[in-house]
Amino acid sequence: MPLLEVGSLTIDYPTSRGAIRAVEDISFSLKKGETLGLAGESGSGKSTLGLSIIRLVPYPGVIVKGHIKIDETDILKLPEDEMRFIRGRKAAYIFQDPMTSLNPVKRIGAHFIELIRTHEPNTGKEEAFERTKTVVKNLGILSERINDYPHQFSGGMRQRIMIGLAIALNPDLVIADEPTTALDVIVQAKILDLLESLRKVYGMALILISHDLSIILERCDKIIIMYAGHMLEYATSIEMHRNPKHPYTQGLLQSIPNIELSDQKLVAIPGSPPDMLNPPKGCRFWPRCSYAKKICRVKEPPLIKVGRNHFVRCFLYGKKGVHVERNRKS
Amino acid sequence: MSDASCMAKKVFMLSEIVKVEHLKKYFPVQKSFLEQLFTRELSYVKAVDDVAFSIRSGEIFTLAGESGCGKTTTGRVIVKLLEPTSGKIYFNGADITKLKGEKLRLLRRKMQIIFQDPYASLNPRMKIIDAVGHPLEIHGLAKGEEKKKKVLEVLEKVGLTPPEQFINLYPHQLSGGQRQRVALARSIILKPEFMVADEPVSMIDVSLRSSIIDLMLSFRKELGLTYLFITHDLAVAKYISDKIAIMYLGKIVEMGHKEPLFWNPMHPYTQALLSAIPVPNPERERKRIELAGEVPSAIDIPTGCRFHPRCPYRTDKCSKEEPQLIEVEKGHFVACHLMK
Amino acid sequence: MTSLTKKGPSGWIVILGTIIVSALVIMTAIAPWIAPHDPAKTRVGPIREPPSPQFPMGTTHLGQDMLSRILCGGSIMLQVSTLSVLVCFLIGVPLGLFSSYVGGVFDRACSLVIDAVYAFPGLVIAIAISAMLGRGVVNMALSIAVVYIPSYFRVVRSQVLSIKELTYVEAARGIGAKWYTILFRYVFPNVIPSIVVVATINFADAILTAAGLTFIGLGVEIHIPDWGRDLTSGWQYLSSGAWWIIAFPGIMIILLALGFTLIGEGLSELLNPKLQR
């Protein structure tokens, strides 16, 4: 039984010049303890998708179609007060910017205690404090620092605290949206290591959202490649690395420098991401694709199964799609 | 290529275009009114603290390091957007440290800078033709039709084709990648010899990054441009540079040609930095070198070796004596007491 | 125009304000030809006659036709406010630009003086200066200008201080632009939107201040038709039931000020890049 199941999810942003379809027909599932990477460029819809899982699609976005099930419950049908219970205890979100997410006039410990006591009103002050201490210790922060204010911490430390707040209620799923984009490499590696070890300790599933394919490949079990609101490819990371199918994925992998290779030749993907108000007809990627055929400009390619746990949305691999629904049971 | 031009190129390659010696840049720390009353001495952020290197003509020299290491400040001091606190800057053999006024303006034709944020580096109220052509007007090189012709030419060169479609647009009508191309066009229109590129691709979409990098590489060939490339991304640094200097808290800790530096990093900080870089390969098991703590403040720099509080190999000597940058192998410099 | 309507409510606010203001300006401009009577001439009808078919807005205590006075009475107010905005603009903007761009002692001194003026209640300064200078359109405009120069100065100064630090200004230095080129081609064009907003709101304020000055008798000569003037002479007769002598000029002043305020508020929302998305 999957922990998270997303089915044909479609999200629109209405604007004065027409609706922007930020996410279109996305389906995937995630088991307990798995790590899923959402990779894509800016505007690919990866953050919108991530936020929709805790039903916090930013205004004025609306979910027009699909379902999101956490532990078999469709959260899109829940009333808001039950949803608040899900957020934090079942699924938690780590935002990119750790400074604006912390209240500057509240001590770090108070953030934790308040969070624990709002979600579990029966917890006593002492108990909440003890739990805070344990979490903070697991974050690699000295427990004396519980009484410090956010501004007394460095960017990396604040991001640790954000991670701590996300896992404090022991959720089954953590969604980390570009958790290390603002941080330096050494701190980034530490934060990602921390996430990985906490994930093992607490047995959570993790969705890692990033524009940096290197991080996703290094840290995730499964990967979704997003482009202009579409899921272009879905595979395990090993499969994605050994055997990328979609021309976009292939292009991305050829355009990122790898520090371990010498004499690498980077190949850029021509063109630029589409204007989401006027996305190209047919496949979203065809204007930049060197394999584009006539059919690509007219018809949207279906999701095609090309291997065990490997799906690609591209006509190069046939014309008949599969229902992801059916595959999920395997 | 004919032999003669090959020879000419070789001679050209050998000459030093930029050289800095003992370069320092300290920023005074702003104090509150009360603090000013009670303390006399000023404290400083030592952004760049005694840096020396030279860049040969035609080379791509990279300053790499984490945020706050002083790489950006070094770049700005070299192109004279900031005054150095002390030290010397030479350009084509001439001392430009104290250059001011009209002479400095003339120098700007030869050295240019492009910035990290393509959204902020263009005047939002200037059309592309004016933004790119403005250097020509400033230096009295072209006006009117001639300016337009040159702008069209240079836009074509940076890959904004057909250029006629772009000249009458405003920056907000372009994407980030296109804006960075416009910024590049503006800086090469004067045919400079040297360019400081301050994180030029870190805010560009991943799929477009390599095209900007390739563009910069092509200018090196076509225009004989020399680059000082500034980046926090060592993977990019490795791809683009000939030589790399790793900076930590205002000082160069290791410097050399890229191959030896990446295959055989000698300074513990370089080793840690390299081991932290994500590699796009899920099947590769990697050993990470853990560093204690975080980068200290550039106001209170640790005594001795400034890296010693975090160094896994530190000895007593490290906290007392500052290591000098010494040549360990030919062309490979390291500032570490372990290297003797 | 169509592009304005596409920008939502603030676009419509600007359009509405522009319609009100231009209607009043046109009305004042063609008033001499459409006014049924000479607005200054007394005894064209009975004294303090309520609105009637012959005098649709009634008559004043001197028997002048109210309608004609309303049609013609905006002229002084528009002249004064336009002139004062112009003076403010010509002094406040350059002062703000130079002071903040040059910085140092000059900037500190300017800021000190300007802040001192700003701290005073505006109307009090205007009254004091106006009393010193005497009556007349130019004198009124000058005394109002002194009150509002600080608003321009402060807005320009704070804008320049933030724009000065932006990368594109640094880029301009990098290509070798001289300081005045940077100031006029890179900094100033980006300050203009804020100045336009201040100017339109300043228009509304100037009108109200001008009305205040004429109300206490520091405005123009008695025989010239003016809305503020009529308020002064009319309020004494309110107790005897002659509401029309102050009601119509009052409405006109409010309308004109409202028109400018609407334009200003709408523009400030349209031009504020932080609100745009």
Image (spheres, coloured by chain):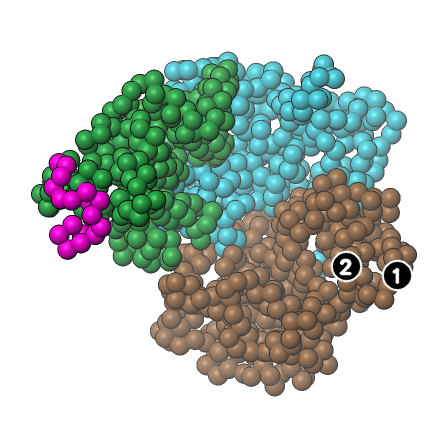
Chain colours: A brown, B cyan, C green
Residue C58 painted magenta:
yes
Q: CA distance from mark 2 to mark 1?
A: 13 Å
Task: Out of C14 and B228, give the one closest to the viewer.
Answer: C14
Per the image, the residue denoted by label 2 is A115
**Which residue lies at the image location 42% right of the left edge and 63% below the top edge?**
A15
**Which residue lies at the image location 48% right of the left edge and 69% below the top edge?**
A12
**Which residue lies at the image location 72% right of the left edge and 47% below the top edge?**
A158
- Mark 1 belongs to which subunit? A
Residue C49 painted magenta:
yes
Q: Secondary structure at mark 1?
A: loop
Q: Measured along the vertical axis of the image, is residue A76 above or below residue A117?
A: below
Query: Do the residues under discs 2 and 1 have CB atoms within 8 angstroms?
Result: no
Q: Which mark is residue A124?
A: 1
- Mark 2 belongs to which subunit? A
Q: Position of residue A95 (x, y in %)?
A: 65, 55
Q: Position of residue A107 (x, y in %)?
A: 78, 46
Q: Measured along the vertical axis of the image, is residue C24 above or below residue B41?
A: below
Q: Which mark is residue A43?
A: none
Q: Residue B5: in sight, yes or no?
A: no
